[in-house]
Image (cartoon, rainbow, N blue to C red):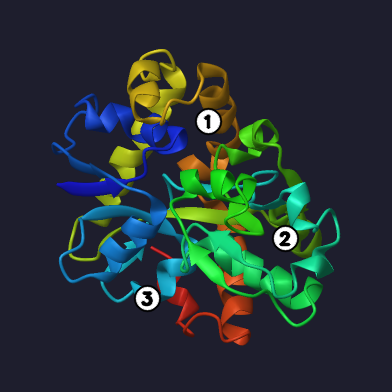
Amino acid sequence: MKISISPCPNDTFVFHAWVHGLIPGAPRLDVTYADIDITNTLAAGSAGPDVVKISYAALPWVLSEYALLPCGGALGKGCGPMVLTSNRAGCNNDSARLSGRRVAVPSERSTAYLLFRLWAAQHVPGGVGEIVVLPFHEIMPAVRDGLVDAGLVIHEARFTYPSYGLTLLADLGSWWEQDTNLPIPLGAIIARRSLDLPAITGWIQASVKYAWAHPEESKEYILHHSQELSPEVTQAHIKLYVNEFTENIGETGYKAVVALLSRASQEGLVPKIDLTALYL
């Protein structure tokens, strides 16, 4: 079975057991590790993987071929994307100063960028200027070096941005939570509708449970793929992004996904979809 996930610690933590053949009855996985911008694109293609991690924001483009699985992804509170600037950009903590600025984002179909557009519509008069898509690990250096005026960051950047001398302009997760009282839906696991979806769901949930029961077993695998992050940062990353919604989205998680995509479609940012198609 072909699967594409990110090399980030939450994905490798969740899928370690299945990747290493530790889930009884689960098929062998052929894994591709790629940044979210690439996995979003893979899912939109006709020859995409059987199972793939994408942004929730990309769901409207793939639901005809793929189903949202109720597990394995990333939802939660206190874990949203952030807008960072450097002092040289002159933005400081005034979001209005992003008007007309050059901003780097990790993907044009990422949940981070979707939230950024919803937030900017309320907080940046006249809108931002040029949007530059960069792999997420290149965004903070680009802001630091003055190649862009601000950066939209995800994942472990929450823990490491001070080391780049950057300033937090906006925490979009906090904004979303205050506005909706719902968790923020970041990354989704989807599978081709032609497959045995209940079985895949069960294998992923078993892999999550194994990871929680045997946290030491996955450490070497996680660090190997974590782009030279320290063990402390990888553990903080896992603690933040792997939670009860990872095992089962549940009613609250589905409400969050519906709220995000409904608001985005009303603003014309994503295609309108039949929201009942989100439920497995």
| Residue identified by numbered label 1 | 238
CB under 8 Å between discs 2 and 3 = no
Q: Is residue 193 above or below residue 218?
A: below
State the SS at label 2.
Answer: helix
Name which residue type carries label 2: Trp
Q: Mark 1 or mark 2, which is nearer the start of the sequence?
A: 2
Mark 1: few/some/many CA within 10 Å (<14, 14-19, 20+): many
- Pinpoint residue 268: horizontal percent, then vertical percent: 57, 86
According to the picture, the residue beneath numbered tag 2 turns out to be: 176
Residue that appears at 64% across and 77% down: 263
Residue 241's x, y, as percent?
55, 39
Query: Residue at position x 56%, y 37% from top?
Result: 156
Residue 181 visible at all: no
Residue toward you, 224 or 27: 224
Residue 265, image quadrant: bottom right
Mark 2–mark 1 Cα distance, whole angstroms, equals: 21 Å
**Residue at screen point 50% across, 18% down:** 231
Task: Specify whether residue 104 is in view.
Answer: yes
Tell me the number on the disc at residue 61: 3
Locate residue 244 relative to residue 49 in the image: left or right: right
**Disc 2 or 3, which lies upstream in sequence?**
3
Q: Residues within 10 Å of mark 2 (few under 14, many from 20)?
A: many
Q: Position of residue 98 (x, y in %)?
A: 75, 67
> What is the quadrant of residue 7 in the picture?
top left
Question: Quick one: label 3, few (<14), some, or many (20+) residues within 10 Å?
Answer: some
Q: Amino acid at mark 1?
A: Ile
